[in-house]
Image (spheres, rainbow, N blue to C red):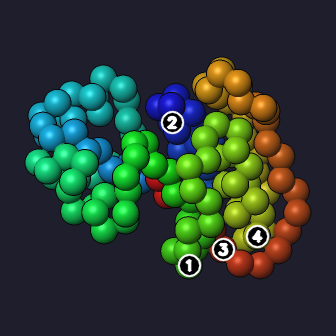
Amino acid sequence: MYPHERSLVEQLADKPFALIGVNSDRDLESIRAIVKEKNITWRSFWNGPQGTGGPISTEWGVTGWPTIYVLDAEGKIRYKNVRGADMDEAITKLLAEMGQEVELTHAASLPTGSKQSTVRQRRRGGGGSASVQ
């Protein structure tokens, strides 16, 4: 999962896109070690010492991990629990609504069984998007 997320952050660095993680491990020091070890380069928040019962997961109604939300620029949840190629497709559709053309390619990092490794979106339109996880 981390290689795919890292690839998104790199490929969409110049687009209106943000990836945000919330970690629900109870031990902050072990989280810091994981962030370094796994080269997590995007903003990641700690859910607190309560772990899965912490304030962020409680506020968002998260009951399973990982939970993925893809939001538009207005902060509306447009997709939930999309991964791999499905996440790429959701992101490219939302960016296309903003007139942003993207082609995401990261075949090596997609989860086993993903149905596609390259997503192209060439339509233009209004609206807005950002992806938040």
**Mark 2: amino acid:** Arg
Whole-number angstrom distance, CA of label 3 to CA of label 4: 6 Å
Q: Which residue lies under the disc numbered 4?
A: 97
Residue 83: x and y, percent? 60, 41
- Which residue is labeled 1 in the image? 74
Q: Which residue is at a point 37% across and 29% down the rendered structure image?
A: 39
Mark positioned earlier in the residue sequence (2 or 4): 2
Tell me the SS state at disc 3: loop
- Residue 6 is marked as 2
Q: From the viewer's perspective, is the residue at label 2 or at label 1 nearer?
A: 1
Please report contact status of discs 2 and 1: CB closer than 8 Å, yes or no: no
Q: Which residue is mark 3?
A: 128
Please rate how many residues cluster around mark 1, counting C-alpha atoms within 10 Å: few if below 14, some from 14 to 19, many from 20. few
Label 4 Cα neighbours within 10 Å, binned few <14 / some 14-19 / many ≥20: some
Category of crowding for the residue at label 3, using alpha-carbon neighbours closer than 10 angstroms: few (below 14), some (14–19), many (at least 20): some
Q: Amino acid at mark 4?
A: Glu
Q: Which residue type does callout 1 highlight?
A: Glu
Mark earlier in primary sequence (2, 1): 2
Q: Are marks 1 and 3 in contact (CB under 8 Å)?
A: yes
Say which label, 3 or 4, has the lower sequence index: 4
CA–CA distance in space, label 2 to label 1: 24 Å
